[in-house]
């Protein structure tokens, strides 16, 4: 049996770890239908029977009125940028910069939906920011091979007047 | 603060303990917790045997790489044989832990409680990827949003609506860094100038590296006591004169409709401030000596000005340009340096409370604001979805 | 259904059952675990599903019974007049064993493949060694629990000496209650909580001291003796945990827990662990069950909930019919 005092320095121990939890998320009825419609070239919202808002993307209940949404309503494929940012730095697991993401209220919707925004030159970020601060109109572009994910569409800035 | 129409305070902060905030601590979480709790109990002049309740705040488990890491370190905070719970509300975790302890004390379930906020995010090697998982996996995660890009979208909106510029926010950052240079616990103590902020790396337009908070680890502990248990004491206490919390909708996209509070009106903070100020008998944030604003980004700090009733929203840029919040004015904003200088996520909202408590108790050392007797602390969590406001007073 | 849909439908039903509008609610206290929900800071998306929009809401990363205690405190302190308490766990979205293994410390315990079921197995082994009654009564006790309808879900992976039907079925579970300051059919008479050490090697595996302390506190606050309680809803991960819980709560003397489950019809009548299990919903499920039983025919109830890392902390609630 060894004895010794604790003043002998011991190199600090580090243990490498890896978290690899896999999940299978249930999208639910509202999201499932939303993506099915998206694959058909339509963007759908659900209507709250109490406040009458058209909620996009579609969801099963209105969290303000706290009731189930009942009706479905198609919204337009053009809209306005409410706000945006330009991702400028590469973080592991996130898309390559520079890329614009923004919230867009599509015509007929009461809420804005998030997606990538293309069509703005990104060689000068401040110039791009200035252009996007003007809240340009955008139109929806669908992916030719939909996968049932939000990336089945994106926005493109148009020259159409507001 | 002795208006007869106001309810007397039921709870007070009687002790504070904090580890330094650093990018990475080598000690175990248990050791950090023990150190902070010991300091808090000593500051409070009470023993662990006097404590009934221990509430731990720990923000996303993913940052520590441990499932429910609180269970491992709660014993180091005195939880064995006592009531204990863990709170997890993202950025507001630390203050939510304190509020939960206050709820239990006010109900008479105990006389003295410890609330701790703990962060070990240096254990995660991919912090932004962890934060990305806080967003909706069905509709949003593929877009690769992050806490930084969510904040940047708020910043853009403030530019659109109120004419803020990156220069305004760089000035806010410089002021926070100047204050941090007096705080021995702060992680960043270099007084970066506004030019340095504007020259730092762009993260997500318009937010740059020095507009954002650092990745920090550390522990903050506070001792809370029921008024009846305090009795008459010569020790300085920080009375909780008002406190409130509100949760907003998750969907950012739901906050652009005309006729409804806008994304950057920060409804949940406005509501929390209204209730906390009413309880405390405050008309305006300008009556406070100190404000510790939980804003992990410079732009987020200015978003809090109107809710805190420092000014109307559109006047914010002008206020900033005039040097609002600096050491020579009142209120002094973030005398600790605020989250710009150290942002241990699970602790930071509690740190705001702890720093305010130190200020009104006259125990803030080199960062003491002279004569401070009234302080306001805010908390923000979940991409500004959760907000809290607390008013502390020396009387 | 999405997780949000599960939560919304459960809380919506609780509100309807209480005859309360969402606008009457001023407090929401939740119990949920990030890793079980499959997302960090899961309450961002789940809290609004539980009615939290515009409310004073807090989410505990702890068992639903502790959430109930906090909600009750808010009412008792006068800050809340009507609150929602909700807790959930959706086992079907993730891998319960991997998630459970991550509860244990990475240096000394996780590499040995420890899960909470393994800790229950250690308890079971110790109980079988010490108490002859556990060996002789386990078949009949297990049969009573297995008699109910099997819920949807997967049986937990076995760990000797535990047998499959003594193990929980990992299910999707969500529970919600509405509690308030107005008089109602069931009253909260007393609460208690306590905590044990983290390291399994430091624990009294058979004694469940946290549960012992918590239930004594709750009953004392309620002015009740355990003999006054005719509705028992005690959380336990496996058959053996339920049996030991009965002893810790002073329902029966040490060693008598397994026989009590075998012989008595008034303990966890929905089947307990066999009716579907997922942390951290279970303490609130026990409270719901106790409430329903009191509304039907009981007088006084003891409901308990245990936290993760193998019941490190426990909450006990004494309820009574008004």
Image (cartoon, coloured by chain):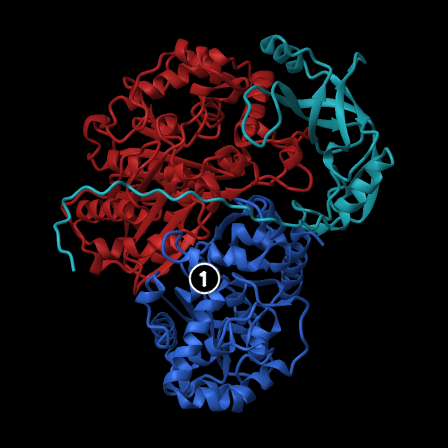
Which chain letter goes with mark 1? C
Camera-side residue of B6 and A42: A42
Q: Which residue is mark 1?
A: C114
| Residue B47 makes an appearance in the image | yes
Using the rendered view, name the quadrant where residue B171 is placed.
top left
Which element is circle 1 on? Answer: loop
| Residue that lies at the very extreme toward the front in this rendered image | A1
* Residue C322 screen position, x and y as percent: 51, 77
- On the picture, is A55 further left or further right than C22? right
Chain the render paints blue: C
Name chain A's colour: cyan
Quadrant showing the N terminus of chain B: top left
| Residue that lies at the very extreme toward the right in this rendered image | A40
| Residue C225 makes an appearance in the image | no
Chain the render paints red: B
- Residue B274 lies, with reference to residue B68, above or below; the image says above
* Residue C68 screen position, x and y as percent: 48, 62
């Amino acid at each position: 049996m060894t004895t010794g005092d604790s003043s002998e320095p011991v190199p600090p121990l580090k243990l490498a770890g890896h978290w690899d939890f896999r999940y299978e998320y249930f999208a639910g009825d509202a999201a499932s239908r939303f993506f099915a419609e998206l694959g058909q070239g339509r963007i759908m919202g659900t209507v709250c029977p109490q406040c009458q808002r058209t909620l996009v993307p579609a969801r099963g209940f209105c969290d303000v009125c706290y009731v189930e949404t009942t009706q479905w309503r198609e919204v337009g494929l053009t809209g306005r940028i409410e706000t945006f940012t330009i991702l400028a730095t590469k973080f592991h697991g996130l898309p390559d910069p520079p890329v614009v993401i923004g919230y867009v209220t599509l015509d007929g919707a009461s809420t804005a939906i998030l997606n990538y925004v293309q069509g703005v030159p990104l060689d000068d970020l401040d110039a791009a920011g200035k252009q996007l601060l003007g809240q340009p109109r955008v139109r929806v572009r669908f992916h030719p091979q939909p996968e049932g994910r939000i990336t089945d569409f994106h926005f493109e800035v148009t020259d159409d007047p507001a | 603060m002795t208006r007869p129409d106001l309810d007397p305070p039921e709870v007070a902060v009687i002790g504070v303990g904090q580890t330094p905030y650093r990018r990475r601590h080598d000690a175990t979480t248990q050791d950090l917790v023990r150190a902070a709790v010991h300091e808090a109990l000593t500051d409070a002049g009470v023993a662990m045997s006097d404590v009934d309740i221990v509430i731990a705040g720990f923000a996303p488990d993913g940052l520590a790489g441990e499932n429910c890491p609180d269970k491992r370190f709660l014993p180091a905070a005195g939880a064995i044989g006592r009531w204990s719970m863990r709170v997890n509300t993202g950025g507001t975790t630390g203050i939510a832990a304190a509020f939960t302890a206050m709820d239990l004390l006010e109900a008479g379930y105990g006389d003295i409680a410890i609330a701790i906020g703990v962060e070990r995010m240096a254990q995660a090697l991919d912090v932004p990827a962890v934060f990305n998982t806080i967003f909706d996996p069905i509709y949003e995660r593929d877009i690769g949003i992050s806490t930084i890009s969510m904040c940047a979208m708020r910043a853009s909106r403030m530019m659109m609506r109120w004419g803020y510029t990156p220069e305004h926010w760089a000035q806010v950052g410089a002021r926070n860094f100047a204050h941090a240079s007096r705080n021995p616990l702060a992680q960043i103590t270099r007084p970066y100038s506004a030019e340095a902020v504007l020259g730092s790396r762009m993260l997500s337009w318009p937010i740059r590296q020095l507009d954002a908070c650092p990745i920090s680890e550390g522990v903050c502990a506070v001792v809370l006591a029921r008024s009846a248990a305090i009795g008459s004491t010569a020790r300085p206490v920080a009375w909780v004169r008002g406190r409130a919390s509100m949760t907003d909708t998750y969907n950012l996209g739901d906050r652009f409709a005309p006729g409804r509070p806008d994304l950057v009106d920060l409804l949940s903070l406005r509501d929390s401030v209204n209730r906390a100020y009413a309880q405390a008998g405050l008309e305006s944030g300008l009556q406070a000596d100190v404000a510790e604003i939980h804003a992990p980004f410079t732009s987020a700090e200015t978003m809090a000005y109107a809710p805190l009733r420092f000014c109307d929203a559109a006047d914010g840029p002008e206020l900033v340009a005039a040097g609002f919040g600096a050491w020579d004015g009142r209120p002094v904003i973030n005398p600790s340096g605020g989250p710009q200088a150290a942002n241990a996520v699970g602790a930071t909202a509690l740190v705001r409370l702890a720093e305010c408590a130190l200020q009104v108790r006259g125990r803030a050392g080199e960062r003491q604001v002279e004569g401070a007797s009234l302080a306001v602390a805010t908390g923000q969590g979940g991409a500004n979805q959760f907000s809290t406001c607390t008013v502390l007073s020396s009387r | 259904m999405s997780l949000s849909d599960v939560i919304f439908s459960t809380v919506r039903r609780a509100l309807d059952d209480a005859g309360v509008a969402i606008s009457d609610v001023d407090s929401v206290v939740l119990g949920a675990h990030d890793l079980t929900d499959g997302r960090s800071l899961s309450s961002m998306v789940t809290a609004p599903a539980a009615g939290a929009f515009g409310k004073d809401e807090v989410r505990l990363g702890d068992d639903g019974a502790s959430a109930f205690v906090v909600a009750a405190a808010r009412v008792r302190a006068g800050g809340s007049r009507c609150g929602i308490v909700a807790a959930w766990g959706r086992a079907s979205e993730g891998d319960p064993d991997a998630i459970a293994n991550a509860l244990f410390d990475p240096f000394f315990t996780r590499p040995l493949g420890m899960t909470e079921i393994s800790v229950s197995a250690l308890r079971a082994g110790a109980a079988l060694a010490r108490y002859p009654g556990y060996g002789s009564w386990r078949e009949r006790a297990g049969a009573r629990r297995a008699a109910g309808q099997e819920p949807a879900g997967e049986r937990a992976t076995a760990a000797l000496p535990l047998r499959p039907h003594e193990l929980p079925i990992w299910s999707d579970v969500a529970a919600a209650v509405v509690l308030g300051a107005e008089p109602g059919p069931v009253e909260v008479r007393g609460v208690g909580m306590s905590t044990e050490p983290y390291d399994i090697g430091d624990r009294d595996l058979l004694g469940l001291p946290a549960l012992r302390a918590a239930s004594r506190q709750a009953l004392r606050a309620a002015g009740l003796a355990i003999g006054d309680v005719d509705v028992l809803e005690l959380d336990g991960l496996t058959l053996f945990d339920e049996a030991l819980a009965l002893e810790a709560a002073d329902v029966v003397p040490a060693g008598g827990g397994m026989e009590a489950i075998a012989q008595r019809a008034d303990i966890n009548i929905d089947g307990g662990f066999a009716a579907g299990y997922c942390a951290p919903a279970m303490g609130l499920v026990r409270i719901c069950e106790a409430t329903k039983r009191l509304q039907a025919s009981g007088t006084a109830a003891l409901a308990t909930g245990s936290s993760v890392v193998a019941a490190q902390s426990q909450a006990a609630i004494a309820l009574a019919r008004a």
